[in-house]
Image (spheres, coloured by chain):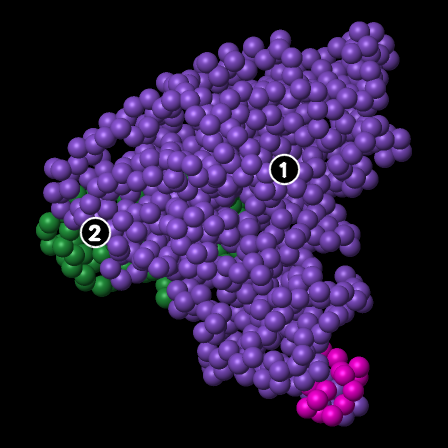
Amino acid sequence: MNIVKTSIGRRSFIKRSTMASGGVILTFNWLVSCDMTPSKIKALPKEWFKINGFLKIAENGLITIMSPNPEIGQNVKTSMPMIVAEELDANWEDVIVEQAPLNTSIFKRQVAGGSQSIRQGWESLRMAGAAARYMLVEAAALTWGVNQNEISVSNGKIFHKSSGNESGFGPIASIASEIKIPKQVKLKKVSEFKIIGTSKKNVDGKKIVTGKPLYGIDYKSENMLIAMIVHPPAFGMKFKSMEATEIKKMPGIKDIFPIKTVSEDYVKQGVDTDSFNEIAVIVGESTWQVMQAKKKLKVNWMMSAEKTEKVKGWSGDIKTFLIPAGLESSEQHNQLMISMDHKKARVVRQDGNPRAVFKRAAKIIERTYTCPYLAHNTLEPMNFFADVTDDRAILVGPIQTPESMEKTVANRLNLPLEKIDIQMTRMGGGFGRRLYGHFVTEAAVISKKMKRPIKLIYTREDDMTQGSYRPTYRATYRAALDKNNNLIAFHVKAGGIPESPLAANRFPAGAIEHYLAESWEIKSNISTGAFRAPRSNFIAGAEQAFLDEIAEISEKDPIQFRIDLLKKAKESPVGQNNDYDPSRYAGVLELVREKSGWENSSDGVHRGVSAYFCHNSYVANVLDVVLENGNPIIDKVYCAVDCGIVVNPDAAKNLSEGGLIDGIGHALYSSMTFKNGKPEQNNFDTYRLIRHSEAPRKIQVDFVENDIAPTGLGEPTFPPIVGALANSLYRATGRRTYNQPFITDKPIIG
Amino acid sequence: MAKFKLKVNSKSLEVDVDPTTPVLWVIRDHLNLLGTKFGCGIAQCGACTIHMNGAAVRSCVLPVSSVGDSELTTIEGLSENADHPVQKAWLEHDVPQCGYCQAGQIMSATALLKANNNPSDEEIDSYMNGNICRCGTYTRIKAAIKTASKNKI
């Protein structure tokens, strides 16, 4: 066992001096009304005993474990409590899961983002379970008058062998809750895990398939009104005026007014940057009535001037951003990005003397890759409930960054932080879109103005044309080969609007003696944001397609070619700060080679490979395309993942499958374009998402087995599959694709 | 505004709404059945799928005035306790990720299996193509439909 000091999470274990009964203190009042009782336990408990901030135990043995982080479909609501239950030695059948309230003094990082929930929660979740287990053992030792070292715990039962004493958790929970919290706890060895590493069903599964109200859009309260917004039709425009007198007379309409989401001098946080600041609002009794008024409302817009925005970054530094004026178009973007090919860019990494080596190369391969803007399109459109009075605000809904938004809302409403109560609902998708909570502030401002509880709902069109898009990127790769086709120098120059997709110290940096990476950016007033595996979601596909071409031209096997480069990075790494472990990188390639039977592929199956490291996890793919009536069909995807210990294997497979399908779908079909500042796609009739018939027929996900602390899985399977797809399409069709979406394979010109 | 008598999940219910109101908003706002989801409002994503006389329809574009005596079934009407064979198959395969589209997926799958209790892969693809899953659970949905079809609903 490992002994871990509990000091890091000390505040998490501060007990209340009085017993919390009936779950009052920890209750998430709305969701708890849903049936959460495990089917095997018939009777509802009479009393709950709070053991620490993460869990409470009832007199009948039921255990409530708080799931700290927002649930966006990554299944943390099941996997995080599993980690607590493991160290507690609970019987999973006895566990009820509740969404925790927002309280970062107990739960630390309550964010859904960066694939970090499990990685960063790992230690505190284990300590919470282990500390509770210690207290139960102490309580049993006191009760039985025996030495605690002679007591064992297994599967929800406490035993003392020599006296024959045995108890469930329930009968001693009240004594356990009075035990002093340990200063140190013993954590299990990986080999002792009984719950972690076994597949547990989604704790919300039954509620999802029976249509229970779980999502923000389902939230209702007494006296609640519905609010919708009208935002400018184009980026580069802003609110001027509106004529609402007649529309206000429409049935059910309560009021129509403009609001400002943030005050002019506000220093924004990194997570509330992306919104039109002044919007028109319609409030009414029912959704359809408000939708009807919204269609008829005539708002006058005007051009925005160039402006600067102050934004406070994650590290607290304040950056100033220039937001240009003007109505931008995709065609103009494309020309601007092409013009960067011949302009100087920032050198972000240089090893050796790449310029000189390129000059003496026997062969130079140069290829350019592009991708368009993408909209997140969470299937649940943006929405939030707000009930704001003069002295407090209650906000309920889907948000990936509740703690940050609490600060923003407090600032905007001029209320103390402790008067803002943000409650987390299950989210109908996140993908990064709900990191940016302008809709939370909008809901709060609307409720304050109306002096009523309101639920703000975006239509699909509002949602898709609001911004926060995945940026558009362009990357040019060059490889220098000597006369024996050895790769002797590598150059990547990449940029985008408004950011570069490059990560300077990622593979193949570190594996090539002469290496140059350059970045450029172009400013824009089209708002962008993190989209599942930001930057990696483009650059991985480009890089992995380029490596495939080098391997082909060098007449090397594409898997062995990558493994050889990684061997070089391991044995004699080039340069500093290489941010990957070459052995684990090669490990996933070796696993996917074995699982896919790479050496013995069958006739008519066209295979492409790729591998990538991002968000602390390693993924390699083999994608098989078959031709049916001349059409390429994705027959099977093999996916090898190294994310350390896998907490909930079947759910991890599900999430990996989702990342693969998401990556394939966006690379093949999706694109957001602009004309005169206006998004040219605004709903699923014009914006194409992957559908049933286009998904791979089979997906096989295999995990590298190791004892490394777990890392993220929400994002890492998305980026590399784009490369495997491009490479297999080439083998099937004889034609390489360089521009996403592959279905059109041309730079987006709108 | 006008009064409509609706048969929803085998119950007779009366609402007083604008006749153009889509059934989606009648059931969500007025009947408080929140399992049926709003996704696009133009019958492109399938999140709002319900049954009208047993056939799958997109409730976001179905005006309440056009329903008449038809029997409407929502996800809440499929079973009280997740014991409909399609729901059971969904749980067996642990299909949902975010879960938002799944009520619509289940309603489409149930209508498909009612019409064809042993669909081929191609028939599943073709029938289910109107239901988007943004999380990418398509392969699990197909597996769940096949499991449910073996149970011969």
Amino acid type at circle 2 is Glu
- Rendered residue at 38%/19% (across/down): A327
Colour of chain B in the rendered structure image: green
Whether residue A143 is in magenta: the answer is: yes
Residue A274 coordinates in the image, percent (x, y): 45, 35
Q: Which residue is mark 2?
A: A285
Part of the protein shown in magenta: A140-155
Say which of A199 and A356 sits in front. Answer: A356
Q: Which residue is mark 1?
A: A637
> In the figure, B14 relative to A260: above or below?
below
Q: Which chain is purple?
A: A
Q: Secondary structure at mark 2?
A: loop
Q: Do the CB atoms of the residues marked 2 and 1 lie less than 8 Å apart? A: no
Letter of the chain that mark 2 sits on in the rendering: A
Residue A436 coordinates in the image, percent (x, y): 47, 41
Letter of the chain that mark 1 sits on in the rendering: A
Amino acid type at circle 1 is Val
> In the figure, A675 relative to B87: above or below?
above
Q: Nearer the viewer, mark 2 or mark 1?
A: 2
So how many labels did they put on this image?
Answer: 2
